[in-house]
Image: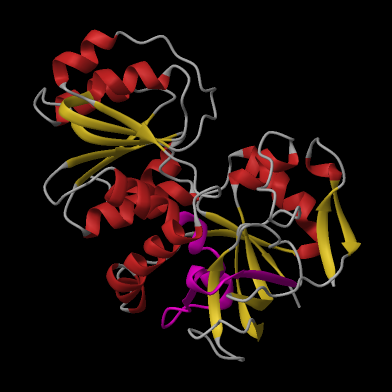
Amino acid sequence: MRAVEISRSGGPEVLRLIDAPMPECGAEEILIKIAAAGVNRPDVLQRAGAYAPPPDASPLPGLECSGEVVAKGAGVSRWQIGDKVCALLPGGGYAEFAITHQDHALPIPDGLTMVQAAALPETFFTVYSNVFMRGGLKAGERFLVHGGSSGIGTTAIQLANIFGARVFTTAGSDEKCGVCKSLGAERAINYRNEDFVAITKELTNGKGVDLILDMVGGDYIARNIRALGTDGRLVMIAFLNGPKAELNFAHIMVKRLKLTGSTLRPQSVQAKAQIAAELREKVWPLISAGRIAPVMDSTFPLEQAVDAHHRIESSDHIGKIVLTLD
């Protein structure tokens, strides 16, 4: 099969199109003939040598795809040959075929193309598990998500809004802020010339927000602590500005804050299956009804994976970047 490998650690140019062996299904795995595959920040980190795949995962990049089930293991009961699915992958999505556990695949929501469906799994698994399962966001609470125009951000804004939260976000241009507001953000803060701590305090009458989803890190961590209200929660999912910060823990004690975080890829088969089950029940009907949709930035043929990585690293994109296969 055709696939894109990481030939060595480095910039986008280290991605190389190769002929790779076909993956083989385990007992509870399905083989997917890929129609499209999402491009995500963890792929960039893996390419740079900063995010090694689990020992039992494909070394090829790619953590989500859409396509058709073309083979299955002896223990698979959920899917039949010919079923159209989108799936969270342990790796291997930059290829014509990939395998995943049967419980990590979901049906294509009504009305979505294969390209749109490929943009769902990584972001929706990440957002739903961290904002609702880990962060406990409830209707009426005040929610701040950084990077609102990213795939994660556009997903988080829509989900938090539809489940009844007040949504605030940060983004890096007036255009991006406009998109965020169109998706349901009450206020989009241009971080290049506005202070999200001061603005969220003003918008909440000094109370602060209840939950923050952050993938920036660095100096944002201490600022997040200041922006949170009493009993607030901070959930970290990435560190674009670095994982280290100097904090005044007295603020955490006085406001009874909770700091947590997670990465998706190393979680157990059972944990990811539970996320998939909740998405199937609570979110997929909303997508099929047209109330939520992935925000799409651009598509590139598999052969142009280098260009796709240049696009995501530019941070000019709004929404998801997807690779397509013939």
Quarter placement of the C terminus: bottom right
Within the magenta stretch, is there residue 66? no
Residue 270 in the image: state x and y as whole percent.
Answer: 44, 61
The residue at 11%/47% (across/down) is 140
The residue at 21%/46% (across/down) is 137
Camera-side residue: 241 or 320? 241
Is residue 195 in view from this perspective? Answer: no
Residue 181 in the image: state x and y as whole percent.
Answer: 31, 48
Vertical comparison of 136 with 274: above or below? above
The residue at 76%/66% (across/down) is 95
Work out which residue is located at the far right of the displayed protein and give it.
Answer: 19
Within the magenta stretch, is there residue 107? yes
Q: In this image, 199 relative to 287: left or right?
A: left
Q: How many numbered tags mark residues here?
A: 0
Camera-side residue: 187 or 53? 53
Vertical comparison of 216 with 44: above or below? above
Is residue 41 in view from this perspective? Answer: yes
Residue 250 in the image: state x and y as whole percent.
Answer: 22, 8
Q: In this image, 70 relative to 229: left or right?
A: right
Vertical comparison of 29 with 205: above or below? below
Camera-side residue: 201 or 101? 101
Quarter placement of the N terminus: bottom right
Answer with the quarter of the image where residue 142 lies.
top left
The residue at 44%/38% (across/down) is 147
Vertical comparison of 293 with 127: above or below? below
Boundaries of the magenta span: 97-124
Answer with the quarter of the image where residue 279 lies.
bottom left
Residue 17 in the image: state x and y as whole percent.
Answer: 87, 59
